[in-house]
Amino acid sequence: MAEVGIYTPLLRRWLLLLAVPLLCSAFQAAPPDSLSILLRQYRNSNQLAPWIYTQLQWQASPSRKAALLQQAPANAWRAPQTDEEQQAWLDLLINQGYMLLLSGDIVSSTDAYQQAFEWAGKHPAIADESLVLEYILKPLGNNYTRLGDYEQALFIHQKALALATSLQDQTALADTYSNLANTSASMGNLQQSLRYCQEGFRTASPNSALYGLLHSEEADAHSRLHQDNAARHSIQESIRILQQQPATNKEAIHWLFMAYQQAGDIYLSTPVTAETYYRKALLYARQQHLVRKREQAKLYLRLGQLYIQQHQPVSALAWLDSCANILLPGKTPSRLQAADMYGEYTLLDMLFARATAYVQLQQPQAAMQAFHLCFAVENRLRNEYVSAASKEMAVSDSRSRYEAAIDAAWQYWQQTKAQPYQQYILEFMEGSKSQLLWEEMQGQSILRNDSTGKRIRRLEQALVFYRKEALQDGGTDSLLQAQQQRISWELATLKKKMPALVSDTLPLPALLKLLPPQQVVRSYFAGASALYTIELDAHGIRFTDRQAISAQWYDSLLYFRQHFFDNGPQAMINAPRDWYNSAYRIYHQLFSQHPLPRNTTCILMPDGILGMLPIEALITKAAYSAAVSKWPFLVKEATIAYAYSLRTWQAQHRSQANNSGFSGFFIVQQPNGLPDLKGAGEEKERIAPAINNGSWYLNEQATVADFRRALSRSAVVHISTHAFTRQHNIPAPHIALYDAPFYLFELNGLEHRPAMVVLSACGTGDGNLVTGEGIRSMAHAFIAAGTPAVVAASWNVQDATTPRLMQNFYTALTTQPNAAIALQQSKINWLDNLDVTDLQKLPYFWAALHFEGNTLALQEGITAKQRPNWYWLVPIAFMLIGWLIISRKKNNRQ
């Protein structure tokens, strides 16, 4: 890329580009003092454009020039005014991004290119499309790919594709197809990646360097598909074509350097061949004097990983030290600190490789420190992502690293019984769980009332509007889609400017203070080969455990859930003994060594498929009885509540919520052709006696407007109507209110929230299982919005049972502040009720409802009266006072 790009007008642009080499030679040896004097002269004469170009033309190392250009926007004494100054400002941002990329600061480089993209959009008169495509969109999209924010990379590359198509630029088209293939492969869309490669082959010249690059992308997709022969053929073709390019083609030189490394990756199953290719890349970089430090660091990392694979940790650390010296100049690799870390994938991989090498060397403290630093980088990287999909992918990708860290800490704990290693297990388990949910909850709590915070709220409101409009339109309006993308982009950019979230280190002492007497926390990590369990109470860690697990066991849990619950009650009705035996086997596996304590509320934090199990319905004894009423359900022995993680549970305790009032929404006669819910009316009548001064919304009274008001005013909001999640193959999860749907994305930005939401509709606790995040259910959405407590249903609830279970629940809440105990008592009363048949005592009919969050969220209980909103009387009172004063004055005059 040229260091200075002048876009308009064309004549001035090319004249200046011709002049740049002459100016650059004049400044090549110019000392900083001379530069400072010249900059001061331009400043004193108020010449902004020459002041900018003088800095662009200064010759220095990438890191020194990047530092200078980063300071330039802050040092500018005024904003650009003329076209020439606006053009110069755009060139400044582009060059800043390029220099930061050369120096290895990928995050700051991305920010600079993003600013350039936004500046070009605001000043179209000075933004030539072909150069915006080459010097802004191309590097910006590639930067997002390097950061792992693939959704944003795809968004940028698709913009570039549209621009290249309109310009009919075949080379730009082929280049963009290459970028799209790379991003698609990184997202796991490998067949799409291969299709993009084929599109690129159709537009690129067969003997061009770009054709060789497309073969590299094709090799990558084939390799990820485990098509080894095809991958090897493609990478050999790539190398052959790139080797034939002229020595003046700098891009081809760089691509060949990368192709040698990629060939090493493809031949990793034969380490000797892989090392040969890596060393070819190393030699080639020295011969060609390649200066991209980030790419050199990646090569050193690959060599370190290769030696780890061969269990040669000492040799591996030597290469990893070389990588660290590039990524963290001036730092001693063995003495790195959290303050030294920043968001960079190569740095992340280098630290994980170091941790693995230390594990092989039996150096536990060094290994634990390297794992900690690795996860610190991971968190910083994730904060740079714009799209939710990229964040979810990053969380999923981190699972194997967390499992390696937990396993290493477990082994050291077993060997030494030293308490710090038990603490490491807890911290790594916690770090792996529901990170995005916690960030959403934190984001709700730190929104400020300054201009940035207000702008975020307005954008969130606008995004809700456009999403609802798109749903009404069926998602076919391209203008609405473009508006959503634009607002999502700006929203994510602004949120990155908000204050940093709290420390990644688990504040265990502060957390334990939140545990009331007779409450324990039991957390799980479901790894690929082992299930880890840890239990806490107010005094600390009670125990840690590890069980070897096979993939087949996880499959059996999924079958258990689907067969006996998701597919309806028939399997349980037809084969109760099969259910009983299966439920007992699961209980034995999970709890036989460490039974849940009696007379204690157990906060369970399941992981993976464990989150889909109805734990309360498990069987605690092997002996089968034909009478369901005599079955030893776990609910009879333990009080169970659920939470996603320690941090989210802590946030639910700290969340400020409405402290009084009840609002219930019951829609019996469903509009829009939905099936009527006869049980909703009975549910209302049964729970009403337990509620003092509630607000009741029946059928047509249950509107979206009233629902929003209830969320902002009532301590308890009860919902008994149809609800739809992504499990129902719909575009947007929502609650079916009488006049319109209430979409879950409308919960964003709620300033006030209920203390507890009761979702007695079908499947409100069910949803997509996201690796590392848990179940993305309707309950999850309310928790993300800051709701301290939620009662939800994991599968389809029954009209015959739910009204009476809800009656028992609310009756218990009038005397029992612990909502989890109230729900447990409701279920036990159901099982003990002689009027209930054995059929209806099968778990399908009563175990769907479960409690999530802060068990003591209802501080004033459900009988507290809702405070009326008397604010509308204030202006009337002032009018009366004014009338009295005027009347008195008139009387005095008389």
Image: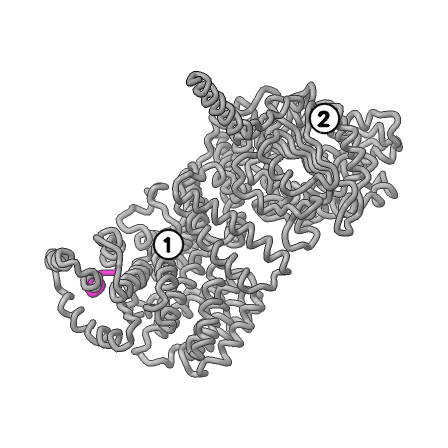
Residue 318: give x, y in percent of width and height: 34, 53
Ranked by sequence position, the earlier of labels 1 and 2 is 1
- The residue beneath circle 2 is 810
Q: Quadrant of the N terminus?
A: bottom left
Asked if residue 308 lies left or right of residue 332, the reply is: right
Residue 381: give x, y in percent of width and height: 43, 50
- The residue beneath circle 1 is 107
Disc 1 is placed on an element classified as: helix
Residue 800: give x, y in percent of width and height: 83, 36
Amino acid at pointer 2: Tyr
Q: Can residue 175 be found in the magenta stretch? A: no
Q: Is residue 856 visible?
A: no
Q: Residue at x 48, y 38 (%)?
A: 442
Above or below 157: residue 312: above
Badge 2: residue crowd in 10 Å (few <14, some 14–19, many ≥20): many
Amino acid at pointer 1: Val
* Magenta extent: 56-62
Badge 1: residue crowd in 10 Å (few <14, some 14–19, many ≥20): many
Question: Which is nearer the eye, 18 or 436?
Answer: 18
Q: Residue at x 45, y 51 (%)?
A: 492
Q: Looking at the image, is mark 1 or mark 2 nearer the viewer?
A: 2
